[in-house]
Image (tube, helix red, strand yellow):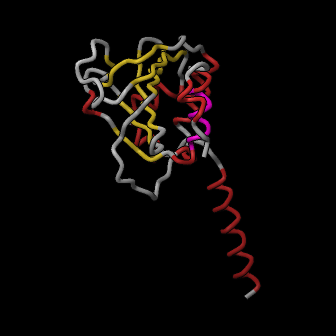
Amino acid sequence: MRRVRSAIVSCLFLLAAGCASSGESTRVREFVGEQPAAVFASADRVEVFRIGSSRDQPDAPRQIVGYPLLATGKEQGNDFAKRLGKVLLNDGTYEWDLAKGCKFDPGVAFRIWTGNHSALALICFHCDQIGIIADESSPRSLRVHDADPGRAALLKLARESFPDDRDLQKLTTD
């Protein structure tokens, strides 16, 4: 009986250690796709955009994959790119056992670059979801997943990108 308890405790410890690790996982790669995962893993710069609801301004002259472009932030360098890539590839960023019924309505877009390859990460802070687009010429390739655990990290990066944006500054991290 003592051996069984010891084995159970050991298994629980290993399980907890595995859950506590916040690294990349197979399911993150499956969600984002191989090309975006490669871009995020070796990101060297990021273009940042504030976007509006596609329902608000369907005829906006400047758009990012169908969403009206409201503002362009300063291009972010290597340090920012590495931090964002780490968040996007982190298994702990995503809520894997939850599905929401809300409409994806992103307000921030990050175009992440490595060399001359890029991928888009669209962030919805209304219902804490991330949308990934591997190729801008194919916005229908949008993959959306819940990211409640990653809200604080993503909001921090969005605020850093747009320090004067009142709407982003007044959002809470929970």
Looking at the image, which is closer to me, 6 or 117?
A: 117
Q: Position of residue 61 (x, y in %)?
A: 27, 12
Kindly identify the residue that appears in the image at 47 percent across and 12 percent down.
115
Q: Is residue 36 above or below residue 111?
A: below
124 or 53, which lies in front? 53
- Residue 105 drawn at (x, y percent): 37, 36
In this view, 134 is above or below 118:
below
Magenta stretch encompasses residue 156: yes
Is 87 situated left or right of 105 in this image? right
On-image quarter of the N terminus: bottom right
Q: Residue furthest bottom?
A: 1
Q: Residue at x 39, y 28 (%)?
A: 35
Q: Main secondary structure of the magenta part?
A: helix
Name the residue at 51% across, 14% down.
73
Is 141 on the left-hand or right-hand side of 47?
Answer: left
Nearer to us in this view, 19 or 101: 101
Name the residue nearer the viewer: 103 or 41: 103
* Magenta stretch bounds: 150-158
The percent coordinates of residue 106 (x first, y second) are: 40, 33
The residue that appears at 48% across and 16% down in the rendered structure is 47
Q: Quadrant of residue 66?
A: top left
